[in-house]
Image (spheres, grey):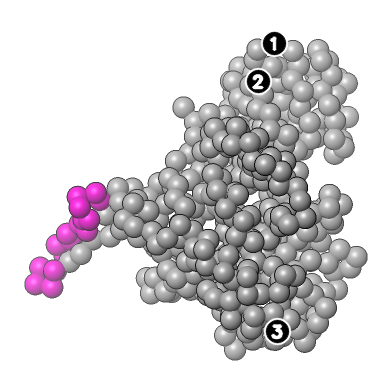
Amino acid sequence: MDNTTNTVRVPELLIPASSLEVLKTAVIFGADAVYIGGEAFGLRAKAKNFTSGEMAEGIAFAHAHGVKVYVTANILAHNGDLDGAREYFAELKAMKPDQPDALIISDPGMFTIAREVWPEVEIHISTQANNTNYQTYLFWWKMGAKRVVSARELSLAELKEIREHIPEEMEIESFVHGAMCISYSGRCLLSNYFTGRDANQGACTHPCRWKYAVMEESRPGEYLPVYENDRGTFIFNSKDLCMIEHIPEMIDAGIDSLKIEGRMKTALYVATVARTYRKAIDDYLESEDKYRSHMDWYKAEIAKCTYRQFTTGFYFGKPNEETQIYDNNTYVNEYIYLGIVEAVQADSGVPGGGQNLSGSQGHAVSGGGALAQITQRNKFCVNDEIEIMKPDGRNIPVRVQALFDEEMQPVESAPHPKQKLYLALTETETGRCADVQQYDLLRVANS
């Protein structure tokens, strides 16, 4: 089967980023577009988010690699938000020469202000706007929106029907991977009720993952666990969406952008999902046989990022009791993130190293004692066996031959988070100096 004809809509792979480091990871590991939040007006107020300077640097980096950047402003605004929103959109408009490629908005008031302040900007309507039918899509199209993000509650059949009723040039964006919300299109009041932090204002505490009990009125203080068929107490805890086995169906439905959820996730998560979905999409567009033949690799790789078991959500019909996790609220976490290679010294011996480290992409010289510079995220030691995760799909097992601190003094372990380190790595199988490059990601199996 040849899927390269003009009738196939080639989907965009849209990846989340919580920080400048994660944005660069998303770009290098296969994103077509990245969505980020500023320090206000997005629905992930507890994420790191971007300062104006970081946003400018991130957009410039993405554009230099041919990747688009969308900025979220998708809170359900109150009166007190409106003047600030006007100023915020003006600031984004002024970010020349590298402006955001689009704004993601859910509130009609925010939409109106954006159109007034920055009439030429492309606007995408957030899933928070509950976009469940083609008349809603047509409404936003007539208002000037370019794209609408579908509600998570839609099936592929419904999305295909929407595509048949909207203009060809209008875009549909749909989630393909990530956490599912207990509430309709993310409009949840649990967090506000329990903690005063409003999910629709960007401050969700994720109470759907908590453990619950009931208390009988005449017996105050006596807590009874909530059971459903004796499976446990985490009754609101949904499995994560994963559509890696259904890329053909997503494309056939006419979806233009396949969106990964996770603007609070680590660089390891982002690199894993971006690389896996990038390969799956490209393989399918080349041929369905190639896509099917690599399915075991996709499934094995996607399971190496944190997840809560997988489901196909609403895409093939309404979920049943099997889409919930009743016995725990923890992630499956098969790999631990160690850091991203920030620079490589390719011409100096080990031990001793040197100070000639640059930000340019470098290659290790076989036998030359190259040092990889990272900012360490989790503990590891000399002689540990770890893995280099490369953007091209290779996973290279390596041994930590030597570690040096920021003063180039030898150390045996890296116990301090965010410590600047230099690593000498050798391939586990051959003993040769590892082929390590800038932006490679280092991880270790979680034993």
**Closer to the N terminus: mark 1 or mark 2?**
2
The numbered mark at residue 398 is 2
**Closer to the N terminus: mark 3 or mark 2?**
3
Verify whether residue 231 appears in magenta: yes
**Secondary structure state at the residue bearing disc 2:** strand
**Closer to the N terminus: mark 3 or mark 1?**
3
Q: Residues within 10 Å of mark 3 (few under 14, many from 20)?
A: few
What residue is at 49 percent from the left and 58 percent from the top? 315
Asked if disc 3 and disc 2 are in contact, CB closer than 8 Å, the reply is no
Is residue 281 visible to us here? Answer: yes
Q: Which is nearer the eye, 254 or 369?
A: 254
Is 445 on the left-hand or right-hand side of 109? Answer: left
Quickly name the residue at label 1: 430
Q: Which is nearer the eye, 447 or 430?
A: 430
Asked if disc 3 and disc 1 are in contact, CB closer than 8 Å, the reply is no
What residue is at 60 percent from the left and 33 percent from the top? 294
How many numbered circles are shown?
3
Between marks 1 and 2, how big is the CA–CA gap? Answer: 9 Å
Residue type for callout 3 = Lys
Is residue 20 visible to us here? Answer: no
What residue is at 61 percent from the left and 25 percent from the top? 386
Mark nearer the viewer, 3 or 1 = 3
> Residue 158: image x %, image y %?
52, 67
Q: Which is nearer the eye, 174 or 359?
A: 174
> Residue 232: image x %, image y %?
25, 50
Q: Residues within 10 Å of mark 1 (few under 14, many from 20)?
A: few
Write the start and end of the magenta stretch as one range. 216-232
Mark nearer the viewer, 3 or 2 = 3
Residue type for callout 2 = Val
Between marks 3 and 1, how big is the CA–CA gap? Answer: 61 Å
> Residue 430: image x %, image y %?
69, 10
Quickly name the residue at label 3: 142
